[in-house]
Amino acid sequence: MIASLIGLGGVIVAGLSVWLSYKWRNAVMRDKLFEKQIEVISKMMDLISRLVLDATALFDLKDKEKVKEYRKGMQDRDESHLNMLQCTYFQAETFLPKEIMEKTYDLMIELTGVLSLYDIDANLPEENNCINQYWALINSIRNEYKIEKLTKEFQKLLPR
């Protein structure tokens, strides 16, 4: 009787230690994944913000010659930022949520069209959709990670 109780206790302790080990390992892996996701999102958003600002500046220039000059001046930097964004995008494809990846891709396509790095003489699109897609990406990140909406006072400080 005592031997069976000791055996049962040993099984319970062994099972509990396996279960706790499993839970601990998964928690650490979840934390590392979250940390990596936030790191990549921060890097992508930094690059995207720079590109969106340049794209928005193009729409503020009304003269086609000024647009052409601005594109020439920013071509190397914007191309570098867009290439870094694409590299980061492809690295993140395996571990970022699908909705965030889709919104990022849509914004990259829009930015490529507006900045026209390989056709400086290209006309600007009729309207600047970069800002709308930028906010759609921010909202999808907010929804995915359950980040509360920013206050109206703080939103006034962000570019529109």
Image (cartoon, grey):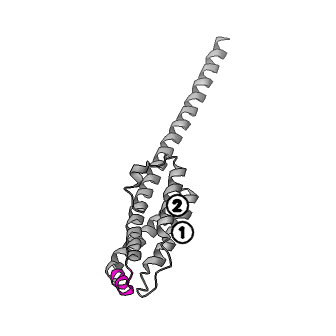
User: In which quarter of the view is residue 69 placed?
Assistant: bottom left
What are the residue bounds of the magenta stretch?
62-71
> What amino acid is found at the position of numbered circle 2 in the picture?
Ala
Discs 2, 1 touching: Cβ within 8 Å: yes
In the rendered image, residue 36, in percent from the top left (x then y), is placed at: 45, 52
Kindly identify the residue that appears in the image at 40 percent across and 64 percent down: 49
Residue 54: quadrant of the picture:
bottom left
Choose between 110 and 129: the one closer to the eye: 129
When the figure is inspected, residue 136 is found, relative to residue 32, above or below; the finding is: below
Task: Please give the label number shown on residue 46.
Answer: none
**What secondary structure predominates along the stretch shown in magenta?**
helix
Measuring 57% from the left and 59% from the top, which residue is drawn there?
A: 99
In the rendered image of this protein, does residue 46 appear above or below residue 60?
Answer: above
Give x and y (percent) for residue 151.
Answer: 43, 48
Name which residue lies at 60% across and 29% down.
Answer: 15
Q: Tell me, for residue 136, which label it has, or none.
A: 2
Residue closest to the far left: 73
Query: The C terminus is located in which quarter?
Result: bottom left
**In what element is the residue under mark 1?**
helix
In the displayed structure, would residue 27 be above or below residue 54? above
Task: Locate residue 27 relative to residue 61 in the image: left or right.
Answer: right
Q: Which quadrant does the N terminus fall into? A: top right
Q: How far separated are the C-alphas under marks 2 and 1?
A: 10 Å
| Residue 67 shown in magenta | yes
In front: mark 2 or mark 1?
2
Residue 151 part of the magenta segment: no
* Amino acid type of the residue tagged 1 in the rendering: Asp
Which residue is label 1 attached to? 106
SS label for mark 2: helix
Residue 121: quadrant of the picture:
bottom left
**Classed neighbour count for the residue bearing mark 2: other residues with Cα under 10 Å, few (<14), some (14–19), many (≥20):** some
